[in-house]
Amino acid sequence: MIDTSFFKELDRFSFMVRKRVSTAYSGSRRSILKGRGMEPVSYREYTQGDDFKTIDWKVYGRTEKLYVKEFEEEKSLTTHILLDTSKSMDFRNKFEYSAMLALGFAYLVTKDNEKFAVATFGDDIIITKPKRGRRFLSLTIDLLNEAKLNGKTNFDYCMEKYASVIRSRSLVFIISDFMADVDAIRNSVFRLGDNELVLIQVLDPLEKSLDFGGEAKLIDLETDAKMDIYTSPRLREEYQHKLNDHISRIKETCMTLGADFHTVTTDRPVFDAIFEVVSRREVKIK
Amino acid sequence: MALLDSFFANPLQFANEAGLYALLSIIPLIIIYLLRPRARKIKIPSIMFLLDIEKKKRLNIFRKFLKDPLFLIQLLALIIISLAIAAPFIMANEEAGGGSTVIILDGSASMQADGRFEKAVVEANKFLSTKNTIILAQSIPLMVMKEAPASSAKDALSKLKAKATGVDLSSAIILGRRMLPEGGRIIVISDFISWSGDSPEIARKVAEASGIRVDFITVRGRTDNIGIVNGWFESSGNYKIVIKNFNTDARDVKIDVSINDKSVLTKSINVKGQSSEYFSISDLNLNPGITRISIGPDDALAVDNNAFVYMPPSMQRDVLYITDNPKSPSIVALGLIPDTKVTKADPKSIPSMSGIVVVSAALPQDAVKKLSDYVSSGGTAVIIASPNLTDMDILPVELGTLANNSTSLNIARQSTITAGIDIEKTAVKKYFKAHLKNTAVGLVESGDKEKSAILAYWKYGKGTVIYSGLADPRGNNIYDPLNENVWNDLHTLPEYPIFWKQMLEWIKGSLDVSEYNAKTGMLIKFPVSVTVNTPSDRVTTDTLLLDEVGIYEVPGKSVAVNLYDERESNLVGGGLPDGAVNVSAANNLPFNPEVIRKPMDLDIYFIVGAIFLVFLELYYLRWRGEL
């Protein structure tokens, strides 16, 4: 259960981040587009087809020439946070950790008064409209607290569906354990490749080390498949090899698209994980 | 199916059936496995990688069946150990005596005739089995190889050669019997011409009584032969040989004599069939070195066509006799000894000393010094009592006063000097009272209470000094018992020359040429291992069997060795003992080893299997990364 004490800590953290990382996710990015806005940037002579509303009549009074005002179109970066709610996330505190990561990023975005949306995905994806403000953040906490963890991760379908609702270039976080077919993950990454993409893999230390001490009957949380194993050092070594291979292939895909990829384990303080991701973004933006 | 048939026909049996109770030990193992904590159920996010790993392993067909290899290994190890305790065996076909065969090859001189030995080797190869022991029968049986496989035995057989000795077949058979404690077969391959010791037939019966089958295989060849069957030195110094013609018809025999490879004599004699002729070589004793006597023409047996005689370079004893009594009977006695040269010298003018120095006079001071130096450097002196003899350092006795009373003599210690001589019968009228010095050895003493030393010796420096209190008579009438100059009557005894001969032999050893000339079959033992040049080889041994004709060079001397064995030279003689198999028959009869059903112990294989499983378990644990 995530409560408001997390935001108090996040506040302190946010202050620390702000000092060290400026304009990291600022929505006040200078747009190169001109259009409707508050601040006029220049004047030019009226040409046929220009909106009459844009003619500065005061200037016409002084100069008897028709001039139109040019405004800078305001542009903000919407952040989409996609959180895995498949059954595989229901392992010890793996989902709580992932949710805190998601809220952490949402909070940072809210601080800059930018829009964000948190979507949960598993077999299907639940999409919310991007909004800004602390009230929306509170609603999001409730949404995550009430999230049901079930089903498999249908990466391909969910990402395709979400990609269709993103209207402009956005910042997209995908927080998952990425325990799925590497081809499906690759396809999804490509679908969202137009955006600034950050993949965060959350793993439990036990899941990573497989240190169950001797014999164990393992049950797959997603498929219910059962397996008797003896977790000998050799088997653990082979497992590590497979896992590392899987991670490497995801990383390789991310590198192709210029996306970020992070692996964090739940024994690591969540703020450290957020800080690591934010630092990387900052460097990239600069 | 054939395998199953074989299994049912030859099932596993157990010598110690009580040992099968050890199989109960697998029950606790199974219980431990059943009682062990069940595997914990753990839900994990994904087993996709583990499924991948398992999929690869399941390609191994055994993995499908071996869910817990460790348990299976331990179970198998326990079962195998338990079965090993029960002493498992199967009844297996085996050649009698474990397939052991003892092959006795006659290696005597007669086997050298006309390739008989080579034929024997061919025959021997037909009888090789699983375990082969090869004995070369000579005057003393020689174990060539023990319980070797057929291939090794074949190699060994191909390297064997017949020797030049007689043969003791019965000893070889008895030795072969000792090599077959569990039974087996003995094959004796010989020409059965002659043998020493018991008849081979008796030895065969003894071996057969122990359940060992003995087969005699005879090999034959040409029988024509003329050989030198004996040879010896005559007292005159001539060497006489006996040449025998074993053929039925008379033959001309050419005799060649060479001394030190230089031909000295060639002669031809006619020897009648089945008879012998003597042939003498004059004064061979005067020709030191190696004399080779050869006869021709060639015949079936070459080894008896040559005889070797060895004369050492020095066969002569030199005696320097220092006396002022030229008629001393001991001079005469010494002069009678063969190969002895006696040089007389006056005490006043003594030449350089050599050989054995006999003193029978009072010596001037410088002569005493000279004698002392000579003995100290390794010479030998015999000092005979004489009226003016004074005490000297080199004497083994302290000379006392002259005793003028009759006494008998007693042997204080037996020695070859007095052997066979009635020394006790010697009447002594005068003698020096003498007492043995320390380290001196008394051989003869006076019969009176004082027991004066009459004959004694001691080591002086590197040499030896012998004191004889039996003074030689002086002057004339030496056989007159009333003559004052006759101190004793030893010189009147017939054994007197023998006494001196034995004295010289005691000093210098016997110069019997037989020491340098021997017959094959003799055994020479050395106190330590020595290197000997045999006629064909160079060996290092402490026991040397003279089994070749020719010259052996042993440390310190050479020895000429001859066959001189009429029985071995007689290739016609002898015959098959009862039951012997003729070689031609052996050729036609295939060798069928006797096959018996015998338990074959398997416990060692089971133990090896259990050890293997233990190592397999260790390897598995190591593979799993737990060791």
Image (tube, rainbow, N blue to C red):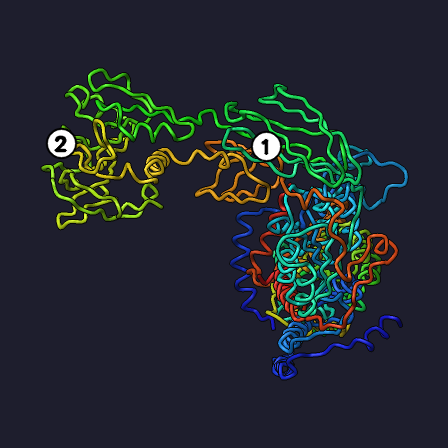
Q: Where is residue B416 in the image (x, y as percent from the top left)?
A: 35, 43
Numbered disc 1: secondary structure: strand
Q: Which of B126 and A29 is in front in this view?
A: B126
Count of number-bearing discs: 2
Numbered disc 2: secondary structure: loop
Viewport quadrant of the C terminus of chain B: bottom right
Please determine whether, in this image, residue A95 is positioned above or below residue B459.
below
Chain containing mark 2: B
Q: Position of residue B600 (x, y in %)?
A: 71, 70
B184 lies left or right of B380: right
Please determine whether, in this image, residue B204 is positioned above or below residue B25.
above
Q: Residue at x 30, y 23 (%)?
A: B320
Chain containing mark 1: B
Task: Classify residue A123 by image quadrant.
Answer: bottom right
Q: Position of residue B31 (x, y in %)?
A: 63, 83
Q: Which of A77 and B21 is in front in this view?
A: B21
B148 lies left or right of B344: right
Disc 2 residue crowd, few under 14, some 14–19, many 20+, Cα 10 Å: some
Under mark 2, the amino acid is Asp
Task: Classify residue B73 by image quadrant.
Answer: bottom right
Q: Which of B226 and B493 is in front in this view?
A: B493
- Is residue B70 in view? no
Circle 2 sits on which residue? B391
Circle 1 sits on which residue? B240
